[in-house]
Amino acid sequence: MKLMLNMTINNEKISVEIEPDSRLLDVLRDDLGLLGTKEGCGVGECGACTVIIDGKTANSCVTLAASMEGCDIKTIEYLSKNGKLHPMQKSFIDNSALQCGFCTPGFVLSGVNLLERNPNPTEEEIKEGISGNICRCTGYEQIVKAVEDVRDEKYIKDGACDE
Amino acid sequence: MNRIIGSRTPIDDALAKATGETTYTADIKLANMCFGKLILSTIAFGKVKSINYSEALKIKGVIDVLTYKDFPSTKYNSALRFKGHGILKTETVLSEDVRFVGDRIGIVIAESLEIAEKALKLIEVEYEEFKPIIDEEAAASSNVQLHEGLDNKVGTISTGSDADKVTELINKADFVFEDKIKIPMVNHVSIETFSVIGDYKSKKVTVYASTQNTFAVRVLISDVYNLPLNKIKVIQPTLGGSFGGKLEVVTELVAVGAAMKVNRPVKIVLSRKESMIASRTRNGATIKVKSGVNKDGTILATDFRILTNTGGYVGSGMNVIGAMSHKLLKAYKYPLRYTGSPVVTNTPIAGAMRGYGSPQAFLGMNIHVNKIAMALGIDPIELNMKNIVDKNEVDILSFGNPELKECVIKGKEMFDWDQKKKDTTEYNKQNNGYIRGIGFGIGAHGAGVYPAHQDCINLLLRLNEDGTFNYWSASHDMGNGSLTAQKIIISEVLTTDVIDIESTEVNTETCPWNLGDYASRGVFVEGEGAYKLAEAMKSLILETAVLKFKVNKEALSIKDKKVWLDDTELGSFGDIAMYAQTTLQKELSVLIDHHSIAGRTSYGAHFAEVEVDKSTGDVKVIDYVAVHDAGTVINRHGIEGQLEGGIQMGIGYALSEKMTFDEKGNLLENNLKKYRIYKANEMPRVRVDFIENGDNGGPFGAKSISECATVPSAQTIINAVANAIGEQTTIIPINKEEVLNIINK
């Protein structure tokens, strides 16, 4: 028995038919073709499935899609939606804060959301803010530096989409 | 002065990764594709008596349920590296005999993963159960053969100094130290789990797999399904991390067989739990090590013995033992004898994991040596310096100019070891509920597989009409930046930038042959191949310029992607390519082969400061320094990232990561809430640096980093804890109860 789900995704109003027990992650990937959000653990621990729901980061693998009625959701695709890179993305690239890239969409969104909520975090606050995401490649050093550079306004927004 | 070698370059596909546009295997959709969910054994040792799937077949959207009866019973070894590789064959695609919880007995195929998962719950399997053996020591001494016709202790490799000589030296020494060290099985936890799509159309197999070893996968498909190699195409889309876990064939053969049966592409994506039990792990180990030491700290000899837990099937068990066998000899300069054996048990299959035996060997050895230092009251750095290899003492050809002592000296200074020693002593006097300590560890690992077997890569480069290049390299970059390093090397020779060189995904049908990506060969072997390739292209460009401009080749040079006659610009690479196409009627392309004729060893020295909570036994790492000898640094961003990542793995190995089993062989840490990976807020400040001396036979003098990065790490933490609490712990990872017991003694 399918449900009709209405939500806003990356600033677009979407209506999609879903199974009542679908996870938000599967609706994004399988129904809406938004493949940038990944599955890494299925239990909300690794953050590869991070999206921003009504202004706060969340693990889409443990979010029931049916509970997203009327919600505002941003995925990694939103940041470069108008063809320009978000400063956080530029910073991740320049700082080599990514290797295999599988955790990267989650970390970029966590970094963006952190600076939205706290524009001037300390190194400790940055580390705390990205501890809902696991990286197995980088050891986090370059990721922290990437967030610091955006905090320190080393990149101009240049018309990129923002949270 | 190098133009691009040694500078900071992001990984070549960083843009797509930062926008989420990169395609990983699980992102791929093929027309008419369906989904496979494995039926895995729920017992650790036994035989399947029956599989009842009649209820499962009734579910709408279930296409079929296949069991071991529907698949070839051809035995193979998933660790096969090349056609004709002679390793023990004990595995089948699906099994009736089960060897561990997670062994594959069947597959449910459905229109969606959700339907396949629902159907799986309705499948009833009956087993004849035998008592499983979980531990390697227990299996080695048991009378029960886990595999018919095979000793549980599969084989033994001994290397190094003569056994009698070692015994004699140990007995002559002032003191004898003996330790037994048990190391748990651990997991790669690549954030991307193992994924594969198998397709079979018009008698041709196509496989998309998250693998480091496409050409070996091709051989295994050919061997098991009796297909010619040219009718098998294996593609590696971008890999979401691997660390060796996707080196051995995991589910590729299942996907191919399933696709053949249902005549549709079949996608199998392992869940995290499945990835932990049904792909690969790092061998657990039991080490017994004995050394004869004089009172001044000089070690006269060491007898080092190791049993590895290779899991339910032999796989690469003997290979890991063999690779491990010479590593300690590259780091310690006195007589050392190594004896190692892999042991099969009823636990998940152990395979390659970053370091391929070196982490276990150096972890055991460093703990043992640290205990010696503590017992003799000698600073551990001072004691190590008496016993580790010198630069000039060893055979340059096989060791590759070891700079281990230089790493120690530089790291000691960066870490401010002497001052920290004083500071931690002062801090601990405060008695404020915490105690601090400092620790040190060393490690080594190789570059390439020489001389074990063939170690070659074939590479193709084409110059386009506009001066850009297309590059075919079957380098299975897994985020380690091997492909980027090759492009940097090519760019140094051809005066281009990384962005001028476009590569494809690894595809056995379009890329020339390469051995798989393991043994840290991405720079030392593959990169040297890229260097040769670039030199060949440079020659070809200049020869073509000679024809176009009618000048002497000796007078020509290249700079800024142009050909020059002294200070005069003659033309761009694009001009040369156009001339070739229009006038000579050919494309400028080069195909080369390169093989490694020598192995090299890379080294590292790590230093850590820890803080122990006296009331809980919790350990926090508060400072960390690592200095490595990896020869010339090709990409400063890449090498730092690799080392920092390796350190995170080592800290986890020391403090939180373990795969343990109940007596029925069930994994207790079966999801990422229970299997603890270090997060950003738990990591210390990490400072890294590199010793870049000398000619090492690799491209521009480079050796390797990717595996060596993690080898010195775990012992550094464990030794720091020992320093803090005054006694070496015995349980790995560090156990809070044991720490508290020692503190409260």
Image: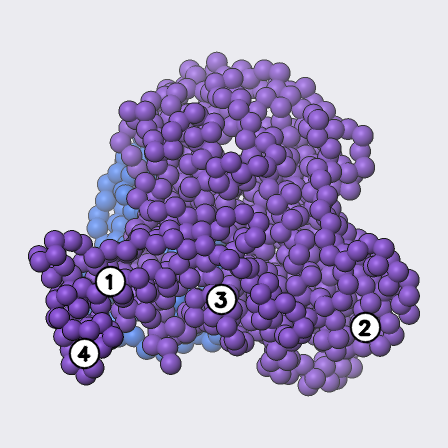
Q: CA distance from mark 3 to mark 1?
A: 24 Å
Q: Amino acid at mark 2?
A: Thr
Q: Amino acid at mark 3?
A: Gly
- Choose top left, top right, bottom left or bottom right for residue B221: top left
Of callouts 4 and 1, the N-terminal one: 1
Q: Are marks 3 and 1 on the same chain?
A: yes
**Is B7 situated above or below B102?**
below
For the point 48% across and 37% down, the residue is B83
The chain holding disc 2 is: B
Mark 2 burial class by Cα count in 10 Å: few <14, some 14-19, many 20+: some
Q: CA distance from mark 4 to mark 1?
A: 16 Å
The chain holding disc 4 is: B
List x then y, in percent, for residue B540. Answer: 24, 62
For the point 50% across and 48% down, the residue is B454
Q: Which residue is mark 2?
A: B298
**Is B61 situated above or below B396?**
above
Task: Report the chain shown in purple.
Answer: B
- Choose top left, top right, bottom left or bottom right for residue B723: bottom right
Left or right? Give the position of B228 relative to B316.
Answer: left
Q: Which residue is mark 4?
A: B565
Please state which of the two labelled residues, at mark 4 or mark 2, is closer to the viewer: 4
List x then y, in percent, for residue A96. Answer: 39, 67
SS assignment at label 1: helix
Please state which of the two labelled residues, at mark 3 or mark 1, is closer to the viewer: 1
Of callouts 4 and 2, the N-terminal one: 2
The chain holding disc 3 is: B
Q: Are marks 4 and 2 on the same chain?
A: yes
Question: Are the residues at dot 3 and dot 4 in contact (C-beta closer than 8 Å)?
Answer: no
SS assignment at label 2: loop
Q: Which residue is mark 3?
A: B697
